[in-house]
Image: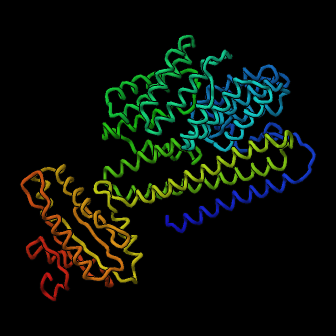
Amino acid sequence: MKMKSYNIFATFSAILITISLIFFLIIREKKSQEKESSFLNKITVSNNTIDFNKLTPLEEIAWEKFQKIPVNEYSYRYEEIAENNRVLLNEPFNENIGAYILKRVLKDGDLSPQAKLFVLNKLRVLDASSGNIVNSIKITMESLNLAEELNSEHDIIKAKIALSSIFNSLGGHNISIQILKDIHIENKDLPGISRTTISLYLYLAENYSFLNNTNEGFKYLNKITPLLKNEDEEYKKNVLILKNLLQARLYIMSNNKEAALQCLNIANPLLDSLKKAFFTDLKNLLLLTTESYYLKYEPNKFSPDNLKNFIKNTNYFGDITFLKIAFNLLFQYYENTENLNEYTKLSKSYDKYLAEINLANNKVFSMYLIENLEHERFAKENERLYKNMILLVISMLFILGVTYKRMLYLDKKARVDTLTTIRNRLAFKEDINSLKGNNYCMLLFDIDNFKKINDTFGHEFGDEVLSTIGKILKTIENKEISIYRIGGEEFAILFAHFNERFAMDSCEYIRKSIENIHWKYPITVTISGGFSKATKNTYAECDRRLYKAKSSGKNMIIYQHINEGDVK
């Protein structure tokens, strides 16, 4: 994606936010009557998107149990209804029948505020498993608002932890950590506080693992075991699965293969035997952690198809952090296998993913902002409105910022050769096409007898030769000189806007510098190259001169037309 596209993207985002803020200021000036309108009042329950003939067996069970409960019993059987939906937490589904059921209870049941808060909390967790991040933000904020109205400290803490998990899923790990560290939970005597504390520590450990901070990650995971003492076995099993998967990630980062494998071997059978789910995405976390292990330690077992299916099945609305992990593992795999075609295709797919998720999120964010501005009650000097507005704008800005930075990063990464850290063939093709019609010079060279070097001293030393030459080339690179590795041992240099003499002197400097390198083996490495000013086919002209240099004894650069004779 070109920089022009980035500028359009950034401009569109800025306009979108500005319009939302202006709309807010206009509405704020109106002296409207107070209106009681919240997420609960605006819930719309539609089954148009649910195909009841294609429910999974677990969805069918949950749906059948719900149908047997009369509407007038929702008010005192809401806990039973919510519990019946727990089985859906870690099951893949096309239609979120569980969320549909809980929304029906909220809309049709004559629930007390405490009951509404209970169901909202369950809906928040269940809806999070659907990957609808925007909806999760709305539900979480409504839970927080209702918890504050009821002055329920424990529910306020749970809502804040949930809010931190949303930022975690969006890639905002530092923001998530800050929210969690602002929660003061120690020495509080609240119902179920041990489980809330466990969740707090698990999220802190997860955030630190995504930031590659293994020390802090292990610190919080080690605090969890004592808290499990009085918990039931099924909940313990859930926590141990998540704890071991996070530990495995940290051990992989620490390059502790045996410990990572041990954690995976603990988590896998526990997940297979799980009867009651308390956390979402355990299966996805297991998949990603296992593939991370394979890629690093047992590449023959690594399955790119598993990750491709994971990305495909998220429909671009899954946990953004998990999706980024999947993409990054595939990028790393294609780099390791030097599969440029698949790398390029994946980069385009990632760009498409970023574009789709931003369009969807921006649209929903904007509509939700407007809904809140039109209908939210103006009470307590708009305190609640300000809070919703600030959180939503921060969320939208964060998504836009992270996505934009990621697009820039991947766009750059897709054009860099992993071994030498200089630009690759893809970047070369794009840059030379952009120079058409301009005056420039080009050097095309390769390493003499490189196959013999590999055969004699091994491919590891061959890689050392390539990376060392890459380092030398980088010393002369600037905005006017661009360096590329375009094949195995083949390199190219583009000189933009420089005179021919300067470019030729630079080529000789490179040739002599490489010839004078002292290697760990008794060997002299040389290069042969072809140089040309811009022509109708500069690459072909350089290639002809390169061939001439090879056939003329090597360790030289041909600068003139091959019919003109000499090397100078």
Q: Is residue 195 above or below residue 173?
A: above
- Place of residue 105 in the rendered image (x, y in percent of width and height, measured from the top left): 78, 30
Screen quadrant of the C terminus: bottom left
- Place of residue 515 in the rendered image (x, y in percent of width and height, measured from the top left): 13, 65
Q: Residue furthest top?
A: 230
- Place of residue 35 in the rendered image (x, y in percent of width and height, measured from the top left): 89, 42
- Place of residue 334 in the rendered image (x, y in percent of width and height, measured from the top left): 36, 51
Residue occupying the point 26% across, 77% down: 503
In screen coordinates, is 252 left or right of 59? left
Q: Is residue 567 visible?
A: yes
Query: Which image quadrant for residue 25?
Result: bottom right
Color theme of the render: rainbow
Q: Is residue 315 above or below residue 125?
A: below
Q: Is residue 395 above or below residue 488?
A: above
* Number of disc labels: 0
In screen coordinates, is 8 left or right of 458? right
Residue occupying the point 50% across, 33% down: 206
In screen coordinates, is 65 left or right of 90? right
Which residue is more in the foreground, 337 or 211? Answer: 211
Q: Residue furthest bottom?
A: 564
In screen coordinates, is 179 left or right of 321? right
Q: Is residue 439 above or below residue 476?
A: below
Which residue is more in the foreground, 296 or 213? Answer: 213
Residue occupying the point 61% across, 54% down: 358
Query: Which image quadrant for residue 156?
Result: top right
Which residue is more in the foreground, 424 or 360? Answer: 424
Q: Is residue 273 visible?
A: no
Residue occupying the point 64% across, 31% down: 59
Which residue is more in the foreground, 238 or 475? Answer: 475
